[in-house]
């Protein structure tokens, strides 16, 4: 069983009102989001690596 399938989903975050943000605030917000995307991508890469290691050790699913 894949534990990723049973982890609770995160609550959807409310969208920020971009209309009231200044250009500087918008740029800072974008940079913060890019940093979070990089963090999420790193976590995905880590999980894929762990899965590959497990598949090598235990054999791939369906074999």
Image (spheres, rainbow, N blue to C red):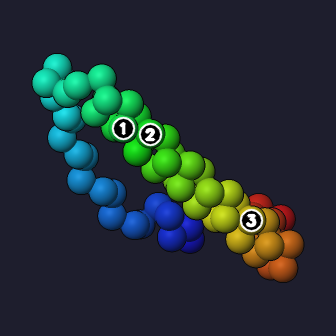
Mark 1 or 3, nearer chain start: 1
Which residue lies under the disc numbered 1?
A: 28
Classify 22 as above or below 32.
above
> Which residue occupies 30% across, 56% down?
10
Element class at badge 3:
helix
Whether residue 51 can be seen here: no
User: As drawn, which residue projects farthest toward the front?
Assistant: 24
Q: CA distance from mark 1 to mark 2?
A: 5 Å
Quadrant in which the N terminus appears:
bottom right
Residue 46 as seen in the image, left or right of residue 54:
left
Q: Residues within 10 Å of mark 1 (few under 14, many from 20)?
A: few
**Nearer to us in this view, 46 or 53:** 46
Classify 55 as above or below 35.
below
Q: Position of residue 32 (x, y in %)?
A: 40, 45
Which quadrant of the figure has residue 63?
Answer: bottom right
> Which residue occupies 52% across, 53% down?
40
Which residue lies under the disc numbered 2?
A: 31
**Residue 8 image label:** none
Element class at badge 1:
helix
Q: Are marks 1 and 2 in contact (CB under 8 Å)?
A: yes
Whether residue 9 can be seen here: yes
> Which residue occupies 23% across, 25% down?
22
Which quadrant of the figure has residue 27?
Answer: top left
Residue depth check, mark 1 versus mark 3: number of the one nearer the observer: 1
Classify 22 as above or below 15.
above
Q: Position of residue 57 (x, y in %)?
A: 84, 79
> Which residue occupies 34% across, 37% down?
29
């Amino acid at each position: 069983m894949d534990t990723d399938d049973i982890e609770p989903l995160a609550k959807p975050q409310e969208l920020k009102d971009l209309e009231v943000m200044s250009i500087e605030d918008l740029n800072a917000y974008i940079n913060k989001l890019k940093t979070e995307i990089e963090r999420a991508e790193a976590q995905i890469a880590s999980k894929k690596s762990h899965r590959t290691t497990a598949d090598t050790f235990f054999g791939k699913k369906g074999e």
